[in-house]
């Protein structure tokens, strides 16, 4: 059978994830990804607004498929084809809250992180420690926590933030948008730190094993 990931040109077109990237169930739901028949690119932009990486996504109500290439520390690109199951929990107000099931531990997660080749929850991605440590010194996450307190939500980045009973919908939407922005900013900072650490680790292990790096060539497809 043909289709995504089965042919050479698909490998060229599947997009790529070089660093940790975050998938947000809310954001995907908002863009219609969780409806049957949706398929398209899902990308991330850098601070200059340019798309830095993207993956191919086949949407769906009960599960979605992620199709991309991944590499770590400038290593070899590897094709990945991952299926992620979805679930929905009724919110106290408004629509259902969509969640992913982490493909590794099966926990319910609002965000999945593309690291170590597959998208997983933050714990399974091994990012919990680094991100919480960074958060304490990070301005954006302080601002995010302030909004979370105002909404009466849990302070963790992956916890849902519902509209409090007394709050007007427009106020809530404004706050929630800002919350997502601030958490994304804070997350980006953490990623920079992680990338720096990984590069450092890469250099150390390369030096130790005295092997030449073969993966430093830039990928040719964007
Ligand atoms: Zn997990």
Image: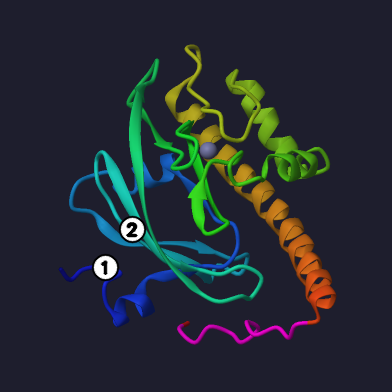
What residue is shown with label 2?
A: 57
Where residue 83 appears, as percent x and y from the top left, is 34, 50
Outermost front residue: 209
Q: Is residue 39 above or below residue 36?
A: below
Where residue 48 appears, as percent x and y from the top left, is 61, 69
Residue 119 horizontal side relative to residue 57, left or right: right
Nearest the viewer among 196 and 171 is 196
Outermost top residue: 166
Q: Residue at x 81, y 38 (%)?
A: 136
Q: Is residue 132 magenta?
A: no
Q: Residue at x 33, y 58 (%)?
A: 57
Q: Quadrant of residue 97?
A: top left
Nearest the viewer among 219 and 24 is 219
Q: Main secondary structure of the magenta part?
A: loop
Where residue 66 appears, as percent x and y from the top left, is 37, 57
Q: Is residue 37 above or below residue 180?
A: below
Instruction: Classify the position of the N terminus by image quarter.
Output: bottom left
Magenta span: 211-221
What residue is shown with label 1?
A: 4
Mark 2, other Cα within 10 Å: few <14 / some 14–19 / many ≥20: many
Residue 191 horizontal side relative to residue 97, left or right: right
Q: Is residue 173 above or below residue 59?
A: above
Q: Residue at x 76, y 57 (%)?
A: 193
Where residue 73 appears, as percent x and y from the top left, is 66, 70
Residue 147 horizontal side relative to residue 105, left or right: right
Nearest the viewer among 184 and 58 is 58
Q: CA distance from mark 1 to mark 2?
A: 10 Å
Q: Is residue 155 above or below residue 60?
A: above
User: Mark 1 vs mark 2: which is more N-terminal?
Assistant: 1
Q: Secondary structure at mark 2?
A: strand
Q: Quadrant of residue 175?
A: top right
């Amino acid at each position: 059978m043909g289709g995504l990931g089965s042919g050479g040109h698909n490998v060229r077109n599947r997009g790529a994830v070089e660093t940790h990237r975050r998938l947000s169930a809310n954001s995907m739901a908002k863009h219609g990804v969780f409806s049957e028949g949706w398929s398209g690119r899902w990308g991330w932009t850098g601070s200059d607004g340019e798309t830095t990486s993207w993956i191919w996504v086949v949407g769906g109500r009960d599960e979605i498929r992620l199709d991309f290439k991944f590499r770590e520390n400038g290593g070899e690109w590897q094709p990945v084809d991952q299926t992620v199951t979805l679930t929905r929990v009724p919110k106290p107000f408004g629509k259902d809250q969509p969640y992913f099931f982490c493909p590794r531990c099966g926990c319910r997660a609002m965000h999945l992180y593309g690291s170590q080749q597959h998208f997983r929850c933050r714990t399974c991605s091994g990012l919990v420690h680094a991100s919480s440590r960074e958060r304490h010194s990070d301005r954006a996450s302080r601002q995010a926590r302030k909004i979370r307190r105002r909404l009466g939500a849990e302070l963790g980045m992956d916890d849902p933030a519902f509209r409090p009973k007394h709050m007007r919908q427009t106020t809530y939407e404004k706050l929630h948008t800002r919350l997502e922005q601030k958490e994304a900013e804070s997350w980006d900072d953490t990623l920079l730190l992680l990338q720096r650490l990984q590069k450092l680790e890469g250099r150390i292990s390369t030096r130790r094993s005295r092997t030449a790096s073969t993966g430093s060539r830039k990928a040719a497809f964007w």
